[in-house]
Image (cartoon, grey):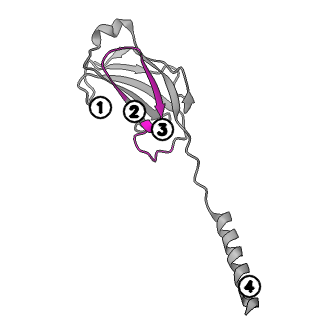
Amino acid sequence: MIQYLKVYLFAFASILVLLSSCAKEEPAKKELNISGTIQIDPALKDKSDEKDTIFLIAKPATGGPPVAVIKFLGNHYPYPYHLTMENLMTADSQLDVPLNLSVRVDKDGDAMTKQPGDLLGVYDKNPVPLQADTINITLTDILK
């Protein structure tokens, strides 16, 4: 009986070793930590309003929908920002590519609409690594 128990324990231990070696590891989620400021071209300052809604938008450099967004209100430039994992659109987003950053001042406050008069800015050195600082984006264009 003891001999069968030894065989059983040996088989069980072998199975555990086999299962642990076959287990697929999930890729580590990369941390998001980008900071900088949102600025406005002085020529557009009179086009901004206290009622403006400002969206900092981060999209994968490979394309696709936004993965992270920060929302600001008003026209008190410059706006410092710190884009982190808390700003992800979905908590289970896997970040594994650099991001393209842009800013849109939405005049009606609805992120889904784009209207003439909205202000736009794109980081001129896109894409941005997932950890970066001093990433300053300037609003330079008006949507026509």
- Cα distance between the residues tagged 1 and 2: 10 Å
- Cα distance between the residues tagged 4 and 1: 65 Å
Residue that numbered label 2 is attached to: 69
Q: Which mark is residue 111?
A: 1
Quarter of the image where the C terminus is located = top left
12 shown above or below 96:
below
Asked whether, in this view, residue 117 is left or right of residue 23, the answer is left
Asked whether, in this view, residue 112 is left or right of residue 3, the answer is left
Q: Which residues are magenta?
A: 71-94
Q: Are marks 3 and 4 in contact (CB under 8 Å)?
A: no
Which residue is at 40% across, 38% downward? 65
120 shown above or below 111:
above
Q: Within 10 Å of the Cα at label 1, are there few (<14), some (14-19), or many (20+) other Cα atoms?
A: some
- Cα distance between the residues tagged 2 and 3: 10 Å
Q: What secondary structure is found at the residue carrying circle 1?
A: loop
Q: Earlier in the sequence, mark 1 or mark 3?
A: 3
Residue that numbered label 4 is attached to: 7
